[in-house]
Image (cartoon, rainbow, N blue to C red):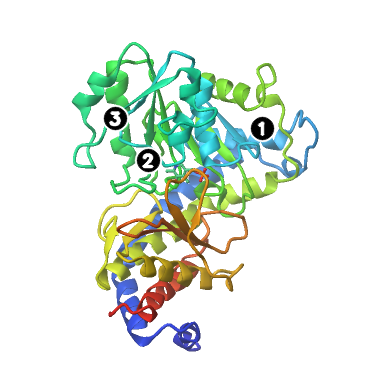
Amino acid sequence: MPDINAFYKEYGIGEKVLELSERIEAELEPRFKAIDGIAEYNQLKVLSAMQKNRVNASFFSASSGYGYNDAGRDALERVYADTFHTEDALVRSQITCGTHALNLALSSCLRPGDELLLPAGAPYDTLHEVIGIRPSVGSLSEFNITYKQVDLIDDKDFDYEGIRAAIGPQTKMAAIQRSKGYASRPTFSVEKIGELISFIKYIKPDIICMVDNCYGEFTETIEPSDVDADMTVGSLIKNPGGGLAPMGGYICGTKSCIEKAAARLTSPGLGREVGASLGINTALYQGFFLAPQVTASAEKGAIFAAKLFEAAGFKAHPAGDEARHDIIQAIDLLKPEYLQAFCRGIQAVAPVDSYVTPEPWAMPGYDDDVIMAAGAFVQGSSIELSADGPMRDPYTVYFQGGLTWHHAKLGIMLALQKLIDAGYML
Ligand SMILES: *Cc1c(COP(=O)(O)O)cnc(C)c1O
């Protein structure tokens, strides 16, 4: 075995970071084994859904134009539905991103006069304009759809009494976000989401419960759809795309919800019958097949980052030893120059665009300037190694992805080294 540390040193990673990394990787062996166990279970779940639906090479051919009778597209939706244990699914390249999938789920099921319940505090930044929390053209509030937000108790627990009080005759839907996203609260386990859904349905059984599953897929052996969510929603350029999906989003759910979503995505009367796949079916199948393994790699990277930066004196959310239900790792870097240094470390290990320097920038849908590091095969893909953060105190970096664990490891080590190079005393 040649000396791998010589390779790391070529990247400028010094002895201190190397030693610390080695120690932490050794400590993490049992954690990594548990993650591999979840990946193994999920691999079999996906594989058996593919076999049950008799996936074959004819599904990989491209449709064009209207996309009528695209057997590969339709079967992929059954594969998703069987994996998520739902009646139906909509998996489409025409769903442009996670926010679009969530907007589709909400706007297809809500009608003027209905109210949306947010039982777990503020939603993901980009949903503020979807809902109309921040005024925006085309928001739900422009259609006279109102919302009620119930904040978490101590930024972690559901306020069941508050939720009970917020549910009224107009409450039609509840939106629950699994991952913390850019918030400071913990990510919810599927089990905890299940408790919330059963409470909401106990109060009013016909409330449609929608879960934003972005970043959560395959981190556990069950999904929100296994605990009675009517719609489970996410992006294909995160976990379930396995790094290969070039675009797309999904909604898995009940027959009636999926019918509404399809009618809204294309047109009433056309629904799911149209939507050419243009030759990306292979990537969607293959990406979904790899997704359990890719998610496990990203999760290992997240835990390694938490432990390494804790050892270096920073605060990580979740903490290195905490249970974990998504692939996002937040670390408070406390200074703008450390946030930039971290992002530069991640950028410098990218297989694509490694020579560019990330700078803070105004992003559509986000309140503050955001700095982003990504050198991805798929533009904006955050299952690929990436780091980003809003330029606001405490300069928290949100780190995610890594198609392979070893790539994530290199990026994290270099990120710490860049902080040291920027003046941080380890
Ligand atoms: C990424 C993300 C979204 C939005 O997805 P985009 O693809 O960026 O539009 C929504 N919710 C959560 C929790 C996310 O992580």
Look at the numbered disc 2 and say if its residue's Cβ is closer than 8 Å to ligand 1.
yes
Quadrant of the drawing holding the C terminus: bottom left
Task: Please name the amino acid that badge 3 sits on.
Answer: Leu
Whether residue 406 is visible: no
Tell me the crowding category of disc 2: few under 14, some 14 to 19, or many 20 or more residues within 10 angstroms, Cα based: many
Return the x and y of residue 79 as percentages of the image width and height.
Answer: 58, 37
Q: Which mark is residue 196?
A: 3
For this rendering, which residue is in front, 252 or 360? 360
Mark 2 residue element: loop
Q: Is residue 65 above or below residue 125?
A: above
Mark 1 residue element: helix
Question: Which residue is label 1 attached to?
Answer: 74
Q: In this view, does 79 lie above or below 247?
A: above
Question: How far apart are labels 2 and 3 at the CA level?
Answer: 12 Å
For this rendering, which residue is in front, 62 or 381? 381
Question: Which residue is label 2 attached to?
Answer: 178
Task: Please name the amino acid that badge 2 sits on.
Answer: Arg
Whether residue 90 is visible: yes
Q: Which mark is residue 286?
A: none
User: Residue 70 occupies which quadrant of the picture?
Assistant: top right
Residue furthest to the right in view is 65
- Labelled pair 2, 3 in contact (Cβ < 8 Å): no
Q: Which is closer to the viewer, label 3 or label 1?
A: 3
Look at the numbered disc 3 and say if its residue's Cβ is closer than 8 Å to ligand 1.
no
Return the x and y of residue 169 as percentages of the image width and height.
Answer: 33, 11
Q: In this view, does 28 lie above or below 388?
A: below
Mark 3 residue element: helix
Return the x and y of residue 103 as percentages of the image width and height.
Answer: 51, 31
Measuring 48% from the left and 32% from the top, which residue is drawn there?
130
Measuring 66% from the left and 41% from the top, which residue is drawn there?
55
Tell me the crowding category of disc 3: few under 14, some 14 to 19, or many 20 or more residues within 10 angstroms, Cα based: many
Say whether disc 3 or disc 1 marks the residue closer to the N-terminus: 1
